[in-house]
Amino acid sequence: MQRRNFIELSAVTALFLMTGCGSSDSGSSTPAPTPTTPATLTLKTGDPLNIPTLLDPTADAITGVKSYNLTIQESSHSFYNEVKTQTYGINGSLLGPTLLLKDGDKVDITYQNNLKEDTTIHGHGMHLPASMDGGPHQKIVAGSSLKATYTVNQKACTNWYHPHLMGKTAEHVYKGLAGMIILEDSESQALALPKTYGVDDIPLVVQDRIFDDNGELSYNPTNRDIMRGYRGDIFIVNGQVNPIFDAKTGLLRLRLLNGSNAGVYDFSFSDGRGFSQIAGDNSFLSSPISLAKVRLSPGERAEIVVDLSGDSNSTIKLNVTETIDARSATILSINVGNTASAVQNLPSTLTGTLDVVDESLSAKTRLFTLEGTGGGNPILTINNKEMDIDRIDERVPVNQTEVWEVTNTMNATHNFHIHASHFRVLDRNGLASAVAENEKGYKDTVIIPPNEKVRILIKMTDYTDTTLPYMYHCHFLEHEDAGMMGQFTVE
Ligand code: C2O
Ligand code: CU
Ligand code: CU
């Protein structure tokens, strides 16, 4: 046994402990917003799962630089059988293609903004110079283009890209702008994991939406919605409602991204089967963690592997429960055929190269307090300050290990996302044992339940720039847009 089973059990226990906190949200004591699903329209369901295109770069023969072109555009997308919905998309009608990048790759991404308004595209989880980060300072003006040029310098993981314009992030993501970035390194390439994109390695961008009576995406948060976060009653995956994926028997890897504005999702299978989480936001976990459900707050990722070896000729359903409004849905039906997939067994070790978590290396503790007041004019702050694009809040010395202590003073769930570098979760409310096993890899976004304090260990390793800042913020997009964001430089 026994060690392994013991570890698995404690991981499940830790996750259940975390789960308890979510229900004390102030949001759940008041009724959720009325569903606005149009009565006269029927959702398109049961289509084959849309797998976002793997974007093909052109490679320069001399420099080796791989060039990618992303065009941000107005479009329309079929959520309903009767009507098309106006959307924003990237190289398509909704969401964008997947970028597959390898550690060491030199890339040159051109973003062409064909919208009638400015936007930005940020690489969430990417370790980049501030000038290439795609945050609020790297505006892509309507009708023009912008390049991001960089060398990939980080571990294999699942990242994503999305707009980050001041005050407009929530609306731009809601209308359809987001896509996945899959990062590989020599470690991931050597592992015997399912890794054939679209066959046994599947990207799943999960979101929730509200549609108006005409089947249009309505983004009209009230002041109360801004405080609570804007959540809908229709769950979509890769832009579809309960599509079907045809799988083989054996192991199936799912890259789960919570791409919602403000939903906190628990993912599980309808028959309650266990699965293994192999990676979190920015790295593999040291070894697979067995779970029956995995919780992701907005912006977080989990790579999971489910064993379908005994399921030939049957259907397995992937379900999501949004934990604040307590809504559940099947988001994906997996039809298992009777041919065997390439990988039948999971490696017991995934990575041996994660930095050791050593708090004694910390030279400084920075305090961040998440606060807010509702009413007529919702104000959401960090350290009692609303985001100001002209103010640098923190100046962080390069190569200095620090503890960042983030306290949620509100009776509502938030999370905390930091650009530029990954971090490690040290403790929750002072308890190292309250950190779940699946939070122990490299992270860039961490959930903070009501009235909880999370301490993380972080080090900015390069890309100094005394003028151009990175962001830290709550990734509930209404909160971010309403001011719960700050700026730091690496110096
Ligand atoms: Cu996913 Cu600052 O963002
Ligand atoms: Cu980010
Ligand atoms: Cu928040």
Image (cartoon, rainbow, N blue to C red):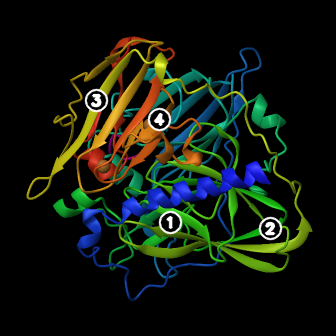
What residue sits right under mark 2 in the picture? 308
Check contact, mark 1 vs mark 3: CB within 8 A.
no
**On the picture, is 148 further left or further right than 419?**
right
- Whether residue 86 is situated above or below residue 366 in the rendered picture: below
Seen in the image, is 54 located left or right of residue 467?
right
- The residue identified by callout 4 is 426
- Which residue, as the protein is rendered here, is positioned at the far front? 2
- The verdict on label 4 being within 8 Å of ligand 2 is no
Q: Is residue 87 above or below residue 448?
A: below
Reading the chain from its start, which is encountered first: label 1 or label 2? 1
Above or below, 42 relative to 448: below
Disc 1 to disc 4, C-alpha distance: 43 Å
Residue at 45% x, 32% y: name it.
145
Task: Name the element at disc 2.
Answer: loop
* x, y percent for residue 437: 59, 46
Reading the chain from its start, which is encountered first: label 4 or label 3? Answer: 3
- Earlier along the polypeptide chain: callout 1 or callout 4? 1
Residue at the spot of label 3: 367
Is residue 411 highlighted in magenta?
no
Q: Could you tell me what secondary structure mostly forms the magenta stretch? A: loop
Q: Quadrant of residue 488?
A: top left
Mark 3 Cα shell of 10 Å, populated few (<14), some (14-19), many (≥20): few
Instruction: Report x, y in % for residue 73.
Output: 46, 49
Q: Secondary structure at mark 1?
A: strand
Amino acid on which the number 4 mark rests in the picture: Leu
Please state which of the two labelled residues, at mark 1 or mark 2, is closer to the viewer. 2
- Where is residue 259? Give x, y as percent: 48, 54
